[in-house]
Image: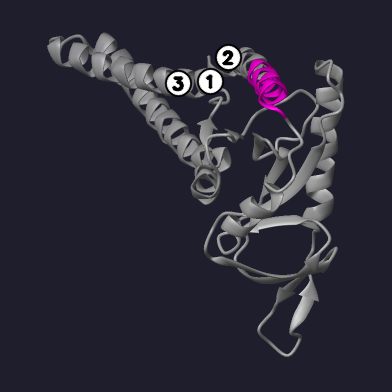
Amino acid sequence: MRLIHPALAKGFRDNALAVALAMLLVGCTALVLMSLLPTTRVAPIALLTLSAALALGVGSAMTWRAVRHLRLKKEQIGDDLARLLAPAFDDSYTLILAPRLPGVPQELSGLLVGPAGVRVLLSRRWRGRYRVRGRTWEYDTRSRAKWIPTITNPFFEAETVADAVGRWARETLEDATIAMTPVVAFPRRHTTVVLEEPDGEVVTTDNAPWFAQRIGRVQRLDPRRAARFVEAVLTASEAEARGSVRAASPNLA
């Protein structure tokens, strides 16, 4: 399987970390200059001390936030989703991780594009044991209450995202016949999902090979159309990323 990561807002993350490191450099420079001044220069020393304290404090806080943001974004990007699907699909499939498309909710975890068509992936990293019966999702409380309905329904959420991707595709591509199939993915092993004739597509760490084999039985998308769709997604994602960088840049000052 070919893996593509558009690197959402990469410029923003790099800029944020660069500004943080620049603040630390300013603080260190102020400390060096302060050490070079004679002790009789009280006013300049006091000013440099204040500048160093502010720069080091702000720089440290910004560095911590930038690093934390990178770590959180790694999960949002969907590295675990790639590990789930990569062994199950061959090179005729392309997985685009965390694309950002105009008008599409940021819950979109990925797009799996190949001969079987386009799968719109919504990741859930729930903990515990769940059951899907038709369109009903339930959680195993492991108590007298046993199975109870989940607060949200991933099928509805995945369909909302898939509909948004479909609208974008119809507006962007001349080929408006590409079907978007919603898929709920559970890429972590700490989630167990019992599938009892679900009325929707679900892929987990337990059924990924079976899922790939099942959807591969139907050929819906030829390589040329798939390539056009992937190219359009990457172009739109890059445009969205540049827009995010421009919107975030004033807040970095």
**Where in the figure is residue 8, as x and y percent of width and height?**
58, 26
Element marked by disc 2: helix
C-alpha separation, residue under disc 2 versus residue under disc 3: 11 Å
Q: Are the residues tagged 2 and 1 within 8 Å (C-beta)? A: yes
Q: Are marks 2 and 3 in contact (CB under 8 Å)?
A: no
Q: Which residue is mark 3?
A: 14
Left or right: where 94 falls relative to 101: left
Q: What residue appears at the point 76 percent right and 86 percent down from the top-left corner?
A: 145
Q: Residue type at mark 3?
A: Asp
**Dot 1 corresponds to which residue?**
12
Front one among 174 and 12: 174
Q: Residues within 10 Å of mark 3 (few under 14, many from 20)?
A: few
State how far apart marks 2 and 1 are (Cα): 7 Å
Residue pictured at 59% horizontal, 36% vertical: 93
Q: Amino acid at mark 2?
A: Ser
Toward which corner of the image does residue 155 lie, by quadrant?
A: bottom right
Most common SS among magenta residues: helix
Residue at position x 62%, y 12% in the image: 246
The magenta stretch is 222-237
| Mark 2, residue position | 249
Earlier-in-chain disc, 2 versus 3: 3
- Image marks 3 and 1: residues in contact by CB distance under 8 Å: yes
